[in-house]
Amino acid sequence: MNENSTNGSRVNRNQKLYDQHPSKKKNRKPRKKRRKWWLIILVWLFILGFIGSLAGAAVFFTYANDAPNITEADLASENSSEILDNQGKVIWTMSTQQRDYASNSDIPKQLKQAITSIEDRRFYKHNGVDPIRILGAALANFKGSSLGMQGGSTLTQQLVKLSVFSTSSSDQTLKRKAQEAWLAMRVEKNFSKNQILNFYINKVYMGHGVYGMKTASEYFYDKPLTQLSLAQLALLAGLPQSPTNYDPYSSDTSAAKARRNLVLQSMATNNIITQKQANEAKKVSVTEGLKSLDSKAELANANRKVVDAYVSSTLSEVKKLGYDTTKSGLKIYTNMDSNLQQNLYDTVNGTSVAFPSDQTQVGATMTNPENGRVVAQIGGRNVSTTLALNRATQTTRSSGSSIKPLLDYGPAIEYLNWPTNRTVVDKAYKYTGTNISLNNWDGKFMGNITMRTALTQSRNTPAARTLEEVGGTRAGEFVNSLGIPTSETPGGSAAIGIDFSSEQAAAAFGAVANGGTYYKPSYVKKITTADGTTHNFNTSGKRAMKSSTAFMLTDMMKGVIKPNASAADAEITGLHQAGKSGLVSYAEDAGMPDRAIQDSWFTGYTRSYALSVWTGYDQPKENYIPWESQDLPAQIYQHVMSYAMSDKENKDWVAPDTVTPVVKGNIVEYEVKDASWSNGGLPTVNSISQSGETPAEAGISSGSASVGSNN
């Protein structure tokens, strides 16, 4: 056997052994491959995770970059805009969101602790976003219990959502969540935890149209937050999550009780209160201390009805002043006297005056003649809606005879220097250029009478003749200067009637009352904006007539409110006052009964107040005022002015040095001092008895030419 064959056999044998017994080296090779694959997988997972993180961060910052700006004004819930009376009492909350802002001193520490216990237990530890809370919420949701938390949102995130985002479920997108988180961190950077909590307390919706916990405290309990019990504070703290479900006014209060008790237990768990305190508070009924919802609604509605017309006029003026009444935080201080407003409302809606029907309507305005400030106003009676038709300003009706002092006799004194005893003619009359006759209310004529008698007895034909002598142009200018518009040059039937409102009438007669200065009616005294800036609005008057004209008109109109005069029902014993009534009859072809009245007016005044009252119907073709109810406006005036003057000095008018008194027939008449005038070739006559003041009543001796000084 040679060496080669021996070696070959050995090789073959070794090969077989190798095949039958694989070496350890060959056994280790697959394990290395498996380890390599796991390593590769881990590396790729890391890479993918890193890339995903970068992508997520990129998306987050992309969304965050598009986030809206958030300012302190967004976070700080402004008060609802309010309208206040002349004493600073709130009479109307303009916004649909009832909110009274709570300062830090208004908020009990225990309320803040209750809120953080139930809404955000780690509030003082995170920077606006709480990863632990997010994971905890996810785990709780997986287990089927939220533990009373609102998802993973922190209290700061909730505030952001309430301030700049919609709370609608359709708006809870990834983009919104990213922006919410980003803005929450910005808020935390710029505001203290206490500020954020205060923002939240004032921002949240509490049900019943109420925003903010201070407002809710007053609404539910009629108490400030500082006077609420632990159980009541816990109830408020738990409400924002679902005000409807947890409403303590609900017929089923089980949900409200469960939520409140959860708040109490959370406080105990967080060692804010003891378990004993929590248990005691849980025993308290959730309805304990609640105000009656019906009485609140009825009271609020009743109060709104009282001031409805005044508020309507106020809002109109605020808009004209350039303020947006939809913005929050305005405090609008008005000239309204709440006592006079209530009295006026009660008079036209009560039983002190007998209205012919429930449909009879009223429009009335009361002003201060010295400055034009409107102190009270009614736009209707039996009003069932808010901001309803304001008949004091939005309804203009024919004035009837109440315009005579302003359109006829005032201009005659102003431009023609007529004295109060100037002779005028009360005889048959036809309007110039027509065959239309003008009659008096009683169908009679008095012949030659004085201007004083013509006015106090409300004779029509002398008024028409006087307007002719004055001229329509000058008469129109005169009433225009008193705030009464005319669509055309007055003439003809305008002598005894042009359209105006009670607001316009009160302001015009107010100018006569104060000696001749016209003030545009004003409702707003000042406005304070949300930033604390106050804007005052002082009325400035414009001379509309001479002091002599104003005094002589007043002296004649005093006789209108005397017994047997045209407005005797307005008489208030001993009170120095003046005024003029007005009736508007129907046309002969209107199909109404004889002496049916379409519109009835009375406008009267003292040194302190001017009050104009209109009564009639919204649909005068369907209803009418019977003759026996003609004095409704005078009766309303009498009731309201008696009340208004009960605490005012009863000051009389003092003749200015521009007039001269002349005693005629035991009545003191007045002439414009040193002025020439014509009696129109008519005989001199005396005024009827009681149409003017006697020398004793006027404070002068018979025949004396002396006059007092104007005060």
Image: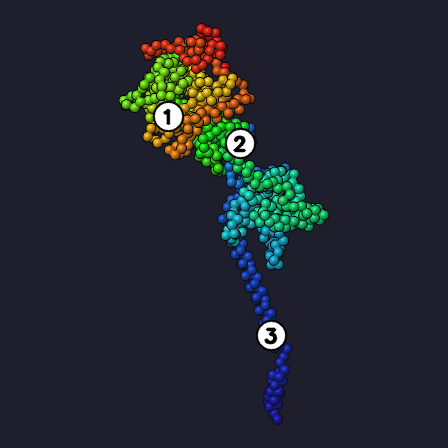
Labels 1 and 2 touching (C-beta < 8 A): no
Q: How has the structure been colored for display?
A: rainbow
Q: For mark 2, does the 10 Å Cα neighbourhood hold few (<14), some (14 to 19), or many (20 or more) residues? A: many
Tag 2 residue: 84
Helix, strand or loop at mark 2:
strand
Between the residue at mark 1 and the residue at mark 2, the CA separation in whole angstroms equals 35 Å
Q: Earlier in the sequence, mark 1 or mark 2?
A: 2
The structure residue drawn at horizontal position 46% and vertical position 11%, both measured from the top left corner, is 694
Q: Amino acid at mark 1?
A: Ile
Against 226, residue 403 (above or below) is: above
Q: Is residue 206 left or right of residue 401?
A: right
Q: For mark 1, does the 10 Å Cα neighbourhood hold few (<14), some (14 to 19), or many (20 or more) residues? A: many
The structure residue drawn at horizontal position 56% and vertical position 41%, both measured from the top left corner, is 294
Tag 1 residue: 498
The structure residue drawn at horizontal position 41% and vertical position 26%, both measured from the top left corner, is 627
Tag 3 residue: 29
Residue 550 placement: quadrant: top left
Residue 685 placement: quadrant: top left
Against 53, residue 579 (above or below) is: above
- x, y percentage for residue 238? 61, 47
